[in-house]
Every structure is written in C-alpha cells, then in structure tokens.
Amino acid sequence: MSEINIDKIEIASNFIHEAIDEDYAKGVYTKKVHTRFPPEPNGYLHIGSAKAIFINYLTAKKYGGEFNLRYDDTNPEKEEEEYVEAILRDLLWLGAKPDHIFYASDYFDKTFELTLDLIKNGDAYVCDLSQEQIRETRGTLTQPGVNSPYRNRSVEENLDLFLRMKNGEFPEGSRVLRAKIDMSSPNINMRDPVIYRIKYAHHHRQGDKWCIYPMYDYAHPIQDALEGITHSLCSIEFEDHRPLYEWTLRKTGFLDQPPRQIEFNKYAITHTVMSKRYLRNLVETGVVDGWDDPRMPTLSALRRRGVTPQALQDFCVKTGVSKSGAVIEIEFLDHCVREDLRSKVSRVMAVTDPVKLILTNYNETGESFELPNNPEVPEMGTRQVPFCKELYIEREDFMPIPPPKYHRLYPGNEVRLMGSYIIKCTGYNTDAEGKVTEVLAEVDFTTKNGGENAGRKVKGTIHWVPADVAVPVEYRLIDHLLSTVHNTNLDEAVLNPNSMIITQGYAEPVVGDAKPGDTFQFVRQGYFCRDTKFPEKMVFIRTVSLKSSYKPAK
C-alpha cells in the first residue's frame, strides 16, 4: 500500500485551516485537531470521496492531530461487508491510513440512552403521521409547517411509545421519533425532523438486536462528539443541516469543546457522474462489469485501470479547497496520471490493431536491437528487441492511397522502423473483401545504427513488434463512460457507446513477463496496465492516452 509522505505534499492554507487557527487562537479547543471520514458502506468510494478523504486526512496531519474512519452503518438495508472492506482498502491505497476505525453502530446503545434523556427533557416526541403526511405538513420555503397532532404528547407517553418501538411492538413506518424544534423555522431541516425510525432489517454487525435506527443528521453529531472530533469537515450540501447538528450537540449535553462543522464545496468532473444511486444502477443492470469496471469513477476502478494514488493525491491537492463550486476537466486527472507515470514506467512497443509487415529482402537470423527502457530516465537501462522478416505494425500506419501530409507507409514511401532500419513499401496484399492482410517492404541495410547511411532522414517513424516472438494481448481501450460533458441532470446523462473498445494485438516479448498491475507506456498508444481482474489472461487496460487537450497553466 502507498503512504502519503506529508513532507512532500505542499498543503496550501485554505479557509478551513484559517478557521481552525482562529479556534485555537481563541482557546475554543485545548485538545489536538481530530477529523474523520464517515462513509456509508452502501457502495464503493469514488473520485469525490478521495477529495473528502484528503481534506480530512491532510488537515489532521498538518496540525499533528488524528484522523478517524467511521462507517456510517445506520441504514442496514443497503449496507454490506463487501463495501466495508472496499472502503478501507481504498483509504490504505490512497495512503490515508486512519488512526482509528469506528462504526456508527458502535454508538447505538449510547445514542439510545441520550435519546431517552432528550425525550425526558421534552425535546422529542413520538409521531404517528406517515412519511407522506410528515412531508405534506412540513411546509415550504415560503410557508411554515403545521404542528403534528402528536406533538404535545406527555413525556411519559413518549417514553412508553419509544420503548415499545425499540421492543418491536409496532409495524415499520407506523411511528417515528421526531425532534421538537420549530415548525415555523425558515430552515426546513429544523421543522421537527425525524431522528429515529422503525426498520426491521438484519444489521451487518448488530444482527437483529435493533429494530429502531437513528437518522444520520441526528446520529452524526453525537458520534463526532463521542469520538472527540474537533472539526467535522463535510461537503456543502450539509450546510443547511448545520443548525440541526449544533442543536443536537446542545440538547444531548455536549457543551465542552463540541465539534465544529465546516463545509467545503464538491467539484463536478466533466464526463463523469458520482451519484452512488446512478453508479449502482449501472452495476445492477450490467452496463458495466462491476464497481471496479475501469470506466467507472470509483477508486477501485481507477486502481484497476492503473491510475496511481500519487496522481490522485496531486489531482486533489491541486484542485484546492473552497466554498464555491467548480467544474474540473477530466483531462486534468489524465494530465496528473501522465505526469506521474512518465518517469516511472518502461516504454515498449505494442500494436492494438495489427497488420503483418513482410520485409521481402530480409533473411537475417538472430538479430536484435538495443532500445532504451525509458529515454527520459537513462538509469532505467535498455533491453534487446528481436528483429525478423515478419513484423506486426499498426493498421493505421499503412494506407494504400494516403491523404495529404500522411508520412507513414504507402506504396513507394519510406519510413524508419523505430530503433532499426529505414524501409520502403513495395506493395500489399488483401483478402476477398479488399481488407489489407499484408504490407510488403524492402530494408535499406545501410541505415542500420553504425551503417554508412544511419543518419539518413525520413519523415515518418513507426513502431513494430517481431511476429515470431510477439506476445498476444487483449487490449481494452478505455474512453469516457459518458458522452455528455456536464452531468448535473442524471436523467440527461448519455452513455458513451465507445467507452470501451476491445481489440486483439501483440506486444514485445518483455511484456510477457508483466504481472497483474504492472504498467507500461506503449509507444504512441498510451499508458497501459495489466488487468488485475483476469490474472490468467494477458489483458491490458489503457490507463490514459498520450494525447491530451488539457494545457496546464504556466
């Protein structure tokens, strides 16, 4: 697993850090900074999750504090152990190793005790209205809500009914516990929100102990306080929920150094959607082959695709922290990936759509050429690439009738085979449908390295793979999952029919030694990672292409 080297990540000060500095300057806290990341284990983490993880993790580490992972397992119907394991795996991969791991369900007993006190103090009541009736009486942004007819039940009756809810005496949906706040509040979240509901579902850790479960907005501040969290850093949609967060802390008695909620804005990423509901639907309907399908924006998918945690760290840090919304081009993530991989991986030759090239005048045996593993990093050494009469080249590198300014192979034209000879195309063969099956060429032996014409210039250079020792490879050419650029309206998001193109091709012999997860730059094709999901097959997923429309700021 990777580790974030905090000394190598420049953490620019932001409004969150300014708020923390102010809190400590005023003496609000005497304990060290303590943050948390509280995902619900109902799906896999995605790029947006990485942003929240880094904000919380790096903030804690900047101040010499602690960082918790807390699973928000308050909704048993949608939570699975698979997601619990995947979430921790993703955090460790990112390098954000938590100092402590907790579960919201760890606090069910304490939350229940605090809720009994809340009822005794007249701050909560059992309501028999249905979910639809509660919604209808809540009011609007311009009209106040209507008090529930059950709002003035006595403390004794509320205690009795709540205990009977806990004991399983009532059907699911027949009663809820609501906070008694203000049905005329301009903030709808404060209009007697539901804080407990009946739910008969097996819990992945608590089993069948409970049939009542606290709502997130109520349970979350209590859990933060019990863990000693100083700053609850969350995304901007919880800003309107902050008054309820603070009300809950006051009413449940957490008055000494209570956690402070601070919101930051999410970012939208072009050609990407990060709604768990939408992503789960893609998985369940078979549009993708799982949460780790390399076209998905999940961290497990990015890892499978060969994206490095260092590239994600760079992406998240450089996109900054703010209150205002932002739309980030997915090409910027691609840029971060290229920048990270360019000096780390070997560059080898591979063809994704092969056509055979026959060198009609070549009859040598046992010849090979020494090529650098990475021209930008000489210390990565060299390798020997066998050369023979029959090679594979990319189909796009030959055209019987070329367009203007086409400098690759066509009858009568010369190109250099990368690292070896200049050749001249003499003809080609086709099948019955007219598809080119073979390209014919002659070698100019004087253009070999060390030959009398080694420096002779031609306009085109193409890569190649020796046919007799080539490694057969299945290539998965990944593109954006969605054709639409901005996907704020999920109903209008359009799937890209060419988001994954599978081809059969070949690669240099050295690729045959690659282990699942190994990454190469395939010359002129992009960065590719050997698929970890099919270790028995030689499958390579394109991590990112070499071409980019993204231009980094100078």
Image (cartoon, grey):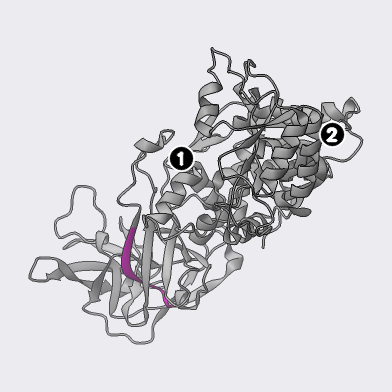
Q: What kind of residue is marked 2?
A: Phe
Q: Could you tell me residue 326's position as x and y percent?
A: 53, 30
Are the two marked residues, 2 and 1, in contact with CB atoms closer than 8 angstroms?
Answer: no
Q: Quadrant of the C terminus?
A: top right
Please report the residue visible at 37 percent of the width from the left and 55 percent of the height from the top: 285
Would you call the spot at circle 1 few (<14 residues within 10 Å), some (14-19), or many (20 or more)?
A: few
> Which corner quadrant of the image does residue 34 belong to?
top right
Q: Which residue corresponds to mark 2?
A: 254
Main SS category, magenta section: strand
Which is more toward the observer, 506 or 361?
A: 506
Residue hosting label 1: 550
The reply to whether residue 219 is in sight is no
Q: Which residues are magenta?
A: 501-509
Q: Is residue 504 magenta?
A: yes
Residue 375: image location, x then y, percent? 52, 61
Asked whether residue 211 is in view, the answer is yes
Tell which of 102 and 411 is nearer to you. Answer: 102
188 left or right of 276? right
Q: Is residue 185 above or below residue 327?
A: above
Residue depicted at 48% across the width and 74% down the height: 535
Q: Which residue is at the front of the view, 153 or 44? A: 153
Q: Which mark is residue 404?
A: none
Label 2 crowding class (10 Å Cα cut-off): few <14, some 14-19, many 20+? Answer: some
Residue 216 lies within the magenta run = no
In percent of width and height, residue 368 lies at: 41, 79
